[in-house]
Amino acid sequence: MDRGFVVNSHQGYGLAFVRALPALLVAAGVLYDYFTPSAFTAAPLFTAAPLVAAPLHSLRGTVLAGLLAVGAVLVVHFVLGIALQVDAVTEVVTVTTAAVLAVLINLVVRRGDERLASVREIAEFAQRAVLPEPEERIAGLQVAARYEAAQEDASIGGDLYAVQDSPYGVRLIVGDVRGKGMTAVATVATAVGAFREAAERETALDAVAGRLDRALTRPGTRRDGVEAVEGFTTAVLAEIPPGEDGVRVVNRGHPPPLLLHADGTLVTLSAEAAALPLGMGDLGAWPAPARRDRFPRGATLLLHTDGLSEARDERGEFFDPAAWLAGRAFPCPDALLTALSEAVRRHTGGTLADDMALLAVRRP
């Protein structure tokens, strides 16, 4: 059986139990009050029921849980003939107060969730606006991109990709901005804009990386605190010149691209020399020479962020994209990305710890 299916099933059962907990607490309280001496009280169980429902259920569900708890207390007291006793009246007042507080808590939680969802939706829209889907064919190459977000409640990340058909060939970038939220999205917009401009103007790929480095270093000088010294972007740039069967790669502290040949042979395009990430140009200049490799017909070039290579399973083991891809064949880049995404989801049990950007280019 698929491990991801088992994990999801367990999560589903756990969620169903938690959502049913208010009713179970009321039922337990009724049984406790009915079968124990009158000196014992189930007030804590009745009080807990609406309070547990408040963050888990809608306003209507929370109100119903409160009415159920108060109604159950009254019914038990009438059945036992103690409805007018002081302790019984005090218990009803206590449960009623808890029900009212639960409704207020629910309103506060819902308002906070709506505000957070609105902020996240705006950030996601902004992020997608600067990361449009590339065309399926660019300069005779087949192209596919995929952005896999982490779990639904995760913060917006800073992964980026872009494809530009320039006078010097098709140029690509995949990067990962340090940080989350709207600041990361703004940096993504800066990086993508600077890449598109530099890709059109610079004759050499390392010069494109240099323009990006300067563009991302300037905003860092205007930040305070940790962001001033730790704001950077890892990136890998690739260039497929026209009329050639090769590819050039410049790596700035990013996971290396993978080149999958038509026969299943896989080559990891590791950087020839270590280089600092983009946005750290004020620390010094280290050369990042472009690596050149053959890119024959039928081969597919895969660029990705560390959300792929650092995806962990329940034992803490990383997903190895090179080992998984080796020996496989795919009809098109989109099929490769779909199969790869599904494999990562199975490996992690259905959830990702970090966002994942994938960009695949195939020479048909």
Image (tube, rainbow, N blue to C red):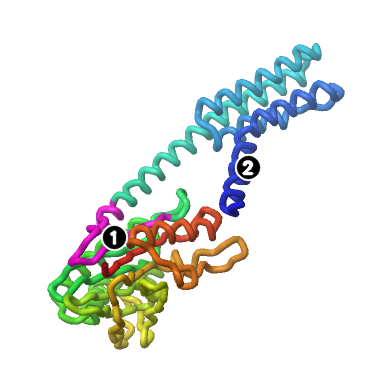
Q: Secondary structure at mark 2?
A: helix
Q: Is residue 309 magenta?
A: no
Nearest the camera: 248 or 162? 248
Residue at image x 26%, y 56%?
133
- Dot placed on the residue nearer the N-terminal end, 2 or 1: 2
Left or right, 189 with respect to 59, comes to left
Residue 243 at x, y percent in the picture: 17, 77
Please rate how many residues cluster around mark 1, counting C-alpha atoms within 10 Å: few if below 14, some from 14 to 19, many from 20: some
Left or right, 22 with respect to 181, comes to right
* Number of the label disc, if any, that sits on residue 14: 2
Nearest the camera: 21 or 242? 242
Quadrant in the picture for residue 149 = bottom left
Cβ–Cβ under 8 Å for marks 2 and 1: no
Outermost residue toward the right?
Answer: 37
Residue 173 at x, y percent in the picture: 28, 70
Left or right, 155 with respect to 235, comes to right
Residue at image x 66%, y 25%?
95
Residue 334 at x, y percent in the picture: 34, 58
* Residue type at the position of mark 2: Gly
Quadrant in the picture for residue 67 = top right
**Magenta residues, as a range?**
126-149
Residue at image x 64%, y 37%?
17
Q: Secondary structure at mark 1?
A: helix
Dot 1 corresponds to which residue? 186
* Residue type at the position of mark 1: Ala
Look at the image and tell me in which quarter the C terminus lies: bottom left
Residue 131's place in the image compared with 321, above or below, is: above
Please rate how many residues cluster around mark 2, counting C-alpha atoms within 10 Å: few if below 14, some from 14 to 19, many from 20: few
